[in-house]
Image (tube, helix red, strand yellow):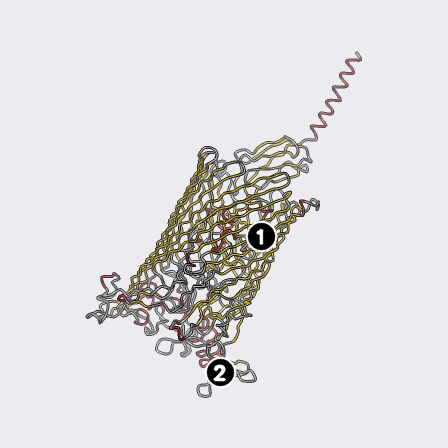
């Protein structure tokens, strides 16, 4: 009986204990999604920290696990950052995981495609995800990174769809060479463009030859790493003095077949237009608008000219595979009808990547890509061949619709239609509809890429890899002009039909070793590479009067653009134009990293280049070293649970900038009918490449369980051995000679900070702020240029580089003033007096480059809704508007109307008659003297760059098949702007042509819809 009672009591106590234990456990459920794609993640490991109790997510990304109320759940997944969540009694825990590329402390892609842990880097490198360029798409995908990275300056050309962009890291360094960074795709440098054509003057008739960024499908991008300094890109040597942009494209994942469809459609309208007067009419034989006051206000002809443009950007990708073979295929197309009538752009992009294993230790990759681009009536800045001059300068009160519908009339003498316009005798002033329909520029461009790599893992620590890529570019540019174009400069028309060809073959071999010895770590890579490039072009150019006999005329019939219609082809090979070039760059390089306790790292790298451009000089070889170190204080000192990373770093490097071909052995020029012209410059037999000495020191930190990230970098670069052309002694019989001299210094800092806040399971917020400052000083120039070097000249406004000044210093014509500072009048005409355009006559108007740049982005997630926006700004700098000057000179600007209403213009107490003032201080043509000083504006501006509101329809077409729809906008409005146009104007990507408005296409404001479907 006692035993039975004891047994009952014991069982009761055990039951009570088990009930208590059971009451302390709870069941937690939730879902895990990919932050970038918004997709559920299948197979995520969910583990109670410190135990073996765990589970994995199912096909919907869901999980369920019994835990204690105070347990910590660890979520881990390959290629994703591990997440820890304290239960704290919650029964639902939803987790969003980010890729390694988005988080400090994970793997990033560095120079030569070498993958490194971000904590170990001794220099600044920022990685952005694919969503940064494909959520709100731009035809040129690099433009989507505007305002998103400290120290990165992107200025799109004012040429519309298919145009290039000026990309700049940490200021302008090279005076005569390129300042663009190297573009690298999957570890291999790519050919930047086919023809290299860019707008470089205010005359007109030039074009934008595009760049490689506009050929990349943004939906193919997995991540982009920005190597901003020379230290980061030192392994690329002579081609990477300006940093590098490392693009990693998507590949298939084994065990998963996925299809992704994306469709982006936007509508575009002009963001900013000039302000016109509409009350004073035509004068001067149908040319200017200095006439009598109109009885009724004239319409805004610019608004009647521009249309609502639209752009569609569609892509589809298919990927899949297993452990032995993976394949990725994609197709993308873009179609755009620009804001300018008759402007169209289309592109097709085919991409394929296949990887497979041979045995277990050898992996092989093959890739192929084809891109076609077609551009019709692409905008280009300048006075001639530009429809905007006719649009903006059209005399107020005249019949716009008549000239629109009747832009040509029949000429019986020539037997063809000719231009119809208010005044057909001015080259800079044409009927815009004649320009668009009878002076149509057309570009048809094809690019082919074929590449492959093979990697052999000899041991766990040692591998060897070989890569090769061949690129071929072909471009046809037609710019035929019909009879009577450009004020009858081409009475029978003009044929221009040019072909351009570019080839690049790149190959390298890399031997890599890494091993950990207790507390020590060593990693080393050594290799060799070569780059062989070729360019060629064939030009067909013919113009003239009607042919009657040899030596009299050149064209048989008007407006027939075939070589058979012309007596001679007038194409020549100019003194600075080579019809065929070849260049080779060979290199050996090595890099090594030593680590101690995962907290102290030292880097060494070295590269030696041999460039064929240095043939006939003292040495074809040049050597570049770099060294750096980083120290993670948190690995050696316990800084508390709120300090996750506390890292300081420093690096120093010397990197070169390669030189143009044929400078050391100049070629003769081939002119018409076989005539040969000797070079005007002396061969540069002592030529040396530019060298950039770069130093940077920085801090990286993450705090509060990785919610706060901070990065700070100070840098200083000195670019020496600049390449100059100076006057040669008269007795030499040559005009110029070349010298190596100069020292351009850039120094500044970059700051970035980010915060991520998970308010609850449904609501989160992330914000990122970046800020940069750059100060540029020309420490040395050359003694042979006592008045400085004129980099660009825009009708009396010049970018002049002087010792002690800065890159981008603007000097302008001005009105003459008396000793008291008041404007002087011409005693005869009553007009103001404008200064000359020599360096001594002009005055300093400021620097064209902004000192400060900033960007602030925010993203809010609430359940399946996502709201994001980006505000960016530039502070300081100047912009010049030749457009505004010409509107004043022609009497069509709002200012000239208000001045006539007032009856006078008063400047510093001196009165002028409005027409006398504005026709003198304003411009009439590309080469007219005018007072540029009145058309220089502050470039400071702050704008809402991007806005997106989206919703994800989960499992809409089945498990894991989601549709994301987002309303998107870009360049929506300015919070602040002083200039009458968008200050981010750029004529081309060359040096010194940014910030100058020469009847440029206005920036577009876009609204649209972005759809993404994945299954």
* 129 or 727, nearer to the observer: 727
Q: Residue at x 35, y 69 (%)?
A: 430
Q: Quadrant of the N terminus?
A: top right
Q: Alpha-carbon neighbours of circle 1 within 10 Å: few (<14), some, or many (≥20)?
A: many
Residue 389 appears in the figure: no
In the figure, is residue 654 to the left or right of 48?
Answer: left
Q: How many residues crowd around disc 2 within 10 Å: few (fewer than 14), some, or many (20 or more)?
A: many
Is residue 896 at least partly visible in the picture?
yes
Q: Mark 2 points at which residue?
A: 912
Secondary structure found at label 1: strand
**Measured Cα–Cα span from mark 1 to mark 2:** 64 Å
Find residue 26 and name its label: none
Choose top left, top right, bottom left or bottom right for residue 10.
top right
Extreme residue in the bottom direction? 827
Rendering coords of residue 110 (x, y %): 53, 48
Secondary element under disc 2, as helix, strand or loop, is strand
In this view of the protein, which residue sits in the foreground, 973 or 151?
Answer: 151
Is 973 located above or below residue 127 in the figure? below
Vertical position of residue 96 compared to residue 816: above or below: above
Whichever of callouts 1 and 2 sits on the residue coming sooner in the sequence is 1
Q: In which quarter of the image is residue 357?
A: top left
Which sits in the foreground, 568 or 620?
Answer: 620
Q: Which residue is drawn at 53% across and 80% down?
A: 907
Q: Is residue 657 above or below residue 132?
A: below
Which is in the foreground here, disc 1 or disc 2? 1
Q: Is residue 825 left or right of residue 69?
A: left
Position of residue 528 measured from the top left corner of the image (x, y, whole percent): 46, 48
Residue hosting label 1 = 627
Residue at 21% over, 66% down: 556
Q: Which residue lies furthest to the right in this view?
A: 2
Residue 869 vs residue 450: left or right? right
Horizontally, residue 957 falls left or right of residue 544, namely right
């Amino acid at each position: 009986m006692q035993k039975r009672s004891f047994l009952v009591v014991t069982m009761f106590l055990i039951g009570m204990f088990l009930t208590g234990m059971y009451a302390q456990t709870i069941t937690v459920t939730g879902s895990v999604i990919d932050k970038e794609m918004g997709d559920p993640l299948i197979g995520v490991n969910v583990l109670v920290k410190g135990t073996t109790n765990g589970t994995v997510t199912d096909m919907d990304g869901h999980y369920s696990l019994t835990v204690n109320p105070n347990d910590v759940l660890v979520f881990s997944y390959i290629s994703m950052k591990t997440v820890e969540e304290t239960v704290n009694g919650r029964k639902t825990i939803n987790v969003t995981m980010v890729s390694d590329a988005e988080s400090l402390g994970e793997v990033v892609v560095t120079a030569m495609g070498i993958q490194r842990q971000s904590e170990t880097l001794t220099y600044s490198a920022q990685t952005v995800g694919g969503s940064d360029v494909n959520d709100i798409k731009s035809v040129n995908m690099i433009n989507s990174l505007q305002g998103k990275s400290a120290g990165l300056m992107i200025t799109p050309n004012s040429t519309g769809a298919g145009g290039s962009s000026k990309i700049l890291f940490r200021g302008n360094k090279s005076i005569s060479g390129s300042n663009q960074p190297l573009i690298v795709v999957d570890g291999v440098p790519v050919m930047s463009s086919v023809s290299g054509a860019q707008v470089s003057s205010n005359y007109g008739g030039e074009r934008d030859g595009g760049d490689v960024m506009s050929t990349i499908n943004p939906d193919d991008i997995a991540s982009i790493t920005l190597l901003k300094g020379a230290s980061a890109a030192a392994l690329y040597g002579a081609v990477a003095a300006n940093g590098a942009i490392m693009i990693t494209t998507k590949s298939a994942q084994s065990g998963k077949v996925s299809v992704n469809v994306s469709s982006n459609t936007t509508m575009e309208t002009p963001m900013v237009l000039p302000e016109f007067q509409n009350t004073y009419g035509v004068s001067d034989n149908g040319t200017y608008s200095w006439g009598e006051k109109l009885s009724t206000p004239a319409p805004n002809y610019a608004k009647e000219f521009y249309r609502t443009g639209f752009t569609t950007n569609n892509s589809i990708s298919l990927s899949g595979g297993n452990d032995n073979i993976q394949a990725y295929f994609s197709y993308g197309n873009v179609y755009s009808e620009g804001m300018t009538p008759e402007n169209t752009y289309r592109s097709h992009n085919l991409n394929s990547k296949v990887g497979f294993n041979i045995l277990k230790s050898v992996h092989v990759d093959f890739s192929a890509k084809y891109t076609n681009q077609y551009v019709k009536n692409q905008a280009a800045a300048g006075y001639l061949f530009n429809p905007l001059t006719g649009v903006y300068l059209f005399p107020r009160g005249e019949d716009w619709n008549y000239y629109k519908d009747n832009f040509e009339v029949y000429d019986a003498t020539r037997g063809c239609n000719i231009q119809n316009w208010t005044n057909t005798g001015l080259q800079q002033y044409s009927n815009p509809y004649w320009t668009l329909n009878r002076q149509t520029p057309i570009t048809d461009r094809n690019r082919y890429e074929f590449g492959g790599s093979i990697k052999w893992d000899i041991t766990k620590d040692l591998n060897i890899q070989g890569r090769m890529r061949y690129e071929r570019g072909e471009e046809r540019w037609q710019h035929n002009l019909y009879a009577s174009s450009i004020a009858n400069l081409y009475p029978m028309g003009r044929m221009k039909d040019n072909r351009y060809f570019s080839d690049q073959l790149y190959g390298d071999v890399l031997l890599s070793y890494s091993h950990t010895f207790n507390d020590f770590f060593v990693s080393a890579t050594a290799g060799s590479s070569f780059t062989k490039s070729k360019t060629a072009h064939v030009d067909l150019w013919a113009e003239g009067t009607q042919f009657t006999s040899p030596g009299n005329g050149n064209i048989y019939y008007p407006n027939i653009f075939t070589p058979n219609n012309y007596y001679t082809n007038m194409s020549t090979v100019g003194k600075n134009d080579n019809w065929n070039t070849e260049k080779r760059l060979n290199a050996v390089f090595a890099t090594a990293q030593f680590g101690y306790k995962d907290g102290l790292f030292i880097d060494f790298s070295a590269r030696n280049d041999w460039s064929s451009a240095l043939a006939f000089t003292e040495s074809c070889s040049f050597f570049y070293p770099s060294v750096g170190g980083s120290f993670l204080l948190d690995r050696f000192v316990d800084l508390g649970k709120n300090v996750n990373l506390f890292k300081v770093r420093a690096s120093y490097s010397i990197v070169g900038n390669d030189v143009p071909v044929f400078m050391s052995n100049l070629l003769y020029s081939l002119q018409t009918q076989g005539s040969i012209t000797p070079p005007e410059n002396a061969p540069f037999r002592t030529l040396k490449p530019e060298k950039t000495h770069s130093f940077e020191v920085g801090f990286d930190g993450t705090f509060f369980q990785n919610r706060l990230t901070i990065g700070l970098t100070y840098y200083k670069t000195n670019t020496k051995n600049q390449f100059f052309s100076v006057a040669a002694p008269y007795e030499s019989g040559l005009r110029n000679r070349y010298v190596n001299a100069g020292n351009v210094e850039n120094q500044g800092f970059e700051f970035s900070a980010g915060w991520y806040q998970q308010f609850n399971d449904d609501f989160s917020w992330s914000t990122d702020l970046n800020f940069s400052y750059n100060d540029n000083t020309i420490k040395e120039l050359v003694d042979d240029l006592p008045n400085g070097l004129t980099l660009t000249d825009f009708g009396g406004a010049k970018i002049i580089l002087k010792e002690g000044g800065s890159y981008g210093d603007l000097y302008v014509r001005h009105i003459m003033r008396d000793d008291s500072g008041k404007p002087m009048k011409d005693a005869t005409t009553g007009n103001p007096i404008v200064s000359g355009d020599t360096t001594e006559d002009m005055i300093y108007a400021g620097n064209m480059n902004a000192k400060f740049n900033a960007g602030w982005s925010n993203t809010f997630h609430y359940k399946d809704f996502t709201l994001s926006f980006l505000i960016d700004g530039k502070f300081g700098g100047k912009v010049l508007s030749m457009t505004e000057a010409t509107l004043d000179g022609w009497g069509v600007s709002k200012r000239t109307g208000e001045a006539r209403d007032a009856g006078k213009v008063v400047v510093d107490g001196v009165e002028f008659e409005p027409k006398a003032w504005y026709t003198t201080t304003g411009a009439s043509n590309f080469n007219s003297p005018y007072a540029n000083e009145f058309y220089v504006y502050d470039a400071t501006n702050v704008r809402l760059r991007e806005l997106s509101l989206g919703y994800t329809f989960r499992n809409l077409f089945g498990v894991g098949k989601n549709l994301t729809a987002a309303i998107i906008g870009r360049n929506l409005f300015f919070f602040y702007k002083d200039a009458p146009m968008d200050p981010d104007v750029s004529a081309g990507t060359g040096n010194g042509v940014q910030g100058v408005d020469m009847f440029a296409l206005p920036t577009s404001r876009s609204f649209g819809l972005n759809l993404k479907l994945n299954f």
